[in-house]
Amino acid sequence: MLRAVLLPTFCWAALARGRQVWSLDEAWRFALEESRPRSCAAGTFPRSLPGRCPHLAKQGRPEDGGPGSAAACRAACCEDVSCNAWQWCGPNATCEAPNSCWKGLIDLANCSTAGQWQGEGDPSMRPKRPKVGQPCDHEQCQVHFNDSHWELLDVPHDFVVAGNFSPHADKSHGYLPYKVGWYRKRLCLNVEEMQGWLEFEGVMVRSQVWLNGEFLGDHFSGYTPRLLDISQVTLKSGCENLLAVRADATSPDGWWYDGGGIYRHVWLTSVAPVHIAPFGLYTPAVVVGKIDRTEGLEYADAEVRPTVELVNQHNTSRNVHVECSISDGGKFVTSKDFDTSLAAGASLDLALPHMPLPGALAIEGPI
Ligand SMILES: *[C@@H]1O[C@H](CO)[C@@H](O)[C@H](O)[C@H]1NC(C)=O
Ligand SMILES: *[C@@H]1O[C@H](CO)[C@@H](O)[C@H](O)[C@H]1NC(C)=O
Ligand SMILES: *[C@@H]1O[C@H](CO)[C@@H](O)[C@H](O)[C@H]1NC(C)=O
Ligand SMILES: *[C@@H]1O[C@H](CO)[C@@H](O)[C@H](O)[C@H]1NC(C)=O
């Protein structure tokens, strides 16, 4: 079956200054969040959780080294500072996995009412989700916190694999304890404001990011990347800029070894106020003519139909000139251009003129 025409397509909006990308992989400071001792007195978990609560992590069954009773499950939650709820699935067929303990930090309001689960929650530890722009209320994300005693490392990094094996940790997560880690990095810049974004390709599992003490955003999956806009943040010319990341690995995404921390690359991208949005270029190639088979290869008339998402962060409307070109092994094939106008603050999805590719080489089979 004919699947695709494989030629690279590039589009750019005519700019005074292009897009610049810097790697932020080097020279992070790292420390685990310290567990504070916690009272396990009666009354710590006053709220009964009879239904199934979502997002709790399985702590294993007794045969896998996990807690072996409701009381042991409660004690395991008590010992863990990032646990506000535990649930025990007893020897009852309607529970998910008989004789298993589940614990974590959750919104207690969201437990369902089904099943024969038992458990309790601590409402005083409701997870807080900061708002974008809100000042940081942990010492670890303050600009002037002294982190010189923290470990100096480069990412990608996994702090779970550096931990000590424990018979009390979950078998399916490699008998390794899953904790909370903090990363801090100084950014040396020569500007006081920047249009652009930070890209975290992967932080396991739940992450929160601050720049210069301001909350930039959070992300609840370790398996997908996250882009964070920095255009509103006040920066400092020099090295007094501080990027801080909290990586909470205590509720793994999978039932396999997930790891924890900034385990993929980190990038900083700066763009001009008028730019193509991140992931804003889509260039499907469509076969429009009859397929001609010659000497085992397939040729057909094809067409590239680009769409591009343009952003104008200026306060005034701007005329934009967009040019798309296709090349084959560095050799210019064809190009199209297009003029448009973008209102102040506008973001616009544009279908560009189709780009014909007569007699293009096609490939057979999956790509
Ligand atoms: C299992 O569930 C039934 C209701 O379906 C209940 O009557 C019984 O007490 C439960 N057993 C245990 C051990 O929780
Ligand atoms: C709890 O449920 C509400 C309503 O369905 C939802 O809006 C909210 O996001 C849920 N919270 C969590 C932590 O799942
Ligand atoms: C930071 O702490 C270290 C000791 O851990 C100390 O030597 C250093 O002077 C401190 N720096 C500042 C700026 O306070
Ligand atoms: C854009 O407008 C805002 C408020 O109207 C103003 O504070 C800001 O300085 C303007 N920015 C530029 C680059 O003109």
Image (spheres, rainbow, N blue to C red):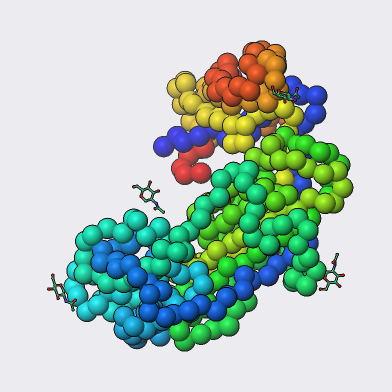
Measuring 35% from the left and 76% from the top, which residue is drawn there? Answer: 101
Q: Position of residue 237 (x, y in %)?
A: 86, 43
How many marks the image carries: the answer is 0
Q: Quadrant of ligand 3?
A: bottom right
Depth order, front residue of 289/319? 319
Question: Is 240 situated above or below 70?
Answer: above
Left-right relation of 207 to 240: left
Find residue 212 and report its horizontal and vertical position in percent: 73, 49
| In front of the other: 317 or 266 | 317
Quadrant housing residue 245: bottom right
Q: Quadrant of the N terminus?
A: top left
- Please, is residue 362 above or below residue 181 in the view? above
Name the residue rendered at 68%, 62% in the picture: 139
Nearest to the observer: residue 341 or residue 211: 211
**Residue in the image at 51% along x and 72% along y:** 81
Query: Can I make out residue 337 in this image?
Result: no
- State the image coordinates of residue 149 (x, y, percent, origin top left): 78, 72
- Percent x, y of residue 49: 29, 66
- Which is more toward the observer, 145 or 352? 145
Residue sitting at 62 percent across and 46 percent down? 134
Question: Is any atom of residue 141 visible in this view?
Answer: yes
Depicted 67 relative to depicted 317: above or below: below
